[in-house]
Image (cartoon, rainbow, N blue to C red):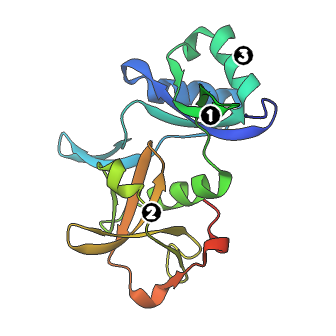
Amino acid sequence: MIDRQQQFWFPMRVTYSRGMKIKGGLDALGIENYIPMKLQLVDYRWTLMPAIENLVFIHTSYDELSNLKRSREEFLPLRYIMHPVMENGMERSEAIIVPDRQMADFIRVSSVHDERVFYMNNLDYACKPGDYVQITDGVFAGVKGVVKRVQKNECVVVPIKDIAAIAIQNLPRKFLRYLAPEEVDF
């Protein structure tokens, strides 16, 4: 069960592509949030656009977020992303939260607009277990992820289960340190 007073990263769906408007409102209130962006060619100009439609990550407490949704009309389009949880032999739904470390790695990788970084569409494959690694050198030093073979390339994937996954390709093997099970914290 989620501690309703503790701050977490909540992935939220936004109806009718109003993510950037929601982001502006959250920024005005000083609430930490993140929308993954990618460079896209629009009318012969490179423009930053949301990489994943209708998704915003919000860092706050469950109670504060629920109060925001109820009390302010501009936040009505926000929807929790739920997942099933077993409690006392009964299944119930609970809002998905993303651990701080995992979110920090996701933000760090998705903030780099590089041809080696891409978003994965096949989340079932991206979120399957694999060899856990930590990148030891370069722009992504410190990032933890899972080694996967994507389009015949060995990549390090930073997944957020059932929500999103971003992959880094063409990393030299010498930049990877394989993690023991007790070192995996995501």
Q: Pick out the residue farthest to the left.
A: 44
Dot label at residue 129 = 2
How far, Cα to Cα, is label 3 from label 2? 36 Å
Q: Residue at 66% x, 73% y: name it.
A: 183
Mark closer to the observer (1, 3): 1
Residue 39 image point, x, y percent: 32, 50
Dot label at residue 14 = none
Q: Earlier in the sequence, mark 1 or mark 2?
A: 1
Q: Badge 3 is on which residue? A: 67
Given the image, on which type of amino acid does mark 2 rest?
Pro
Q: Residue at 56% x, 60% y: name it.
A: 105
How far, Cα to Cα, is label 1 from label 2? 22 Å
Q: Pick out the residue farthest to the front.
A: 89
Residue 155 image point, x, y percent: 35, 71
Say if residue 142 shows up in the picture.
yes
Instruction: Using the image, determine if residue 117 lies above or below residue 87.
Output: below
Mark closer to the observer (1, 2): 1
Left or right: 1, with 153 as reference point: right
Quadrant where the C terminus is found in the figure: bottom right
Q: Badge 1 is on which residue? A: 86
Given the image, on which type of amino acid does mark 3 rest?
Asn
State which quadrant residue 94 falls in. Answer: top right
Q: Pick out the residue farthest to the bottom.
A: 174
Given the image, on which type of amino acid does mark 1 rest?
Met
Say if residue 111 shows up in the picture.
no
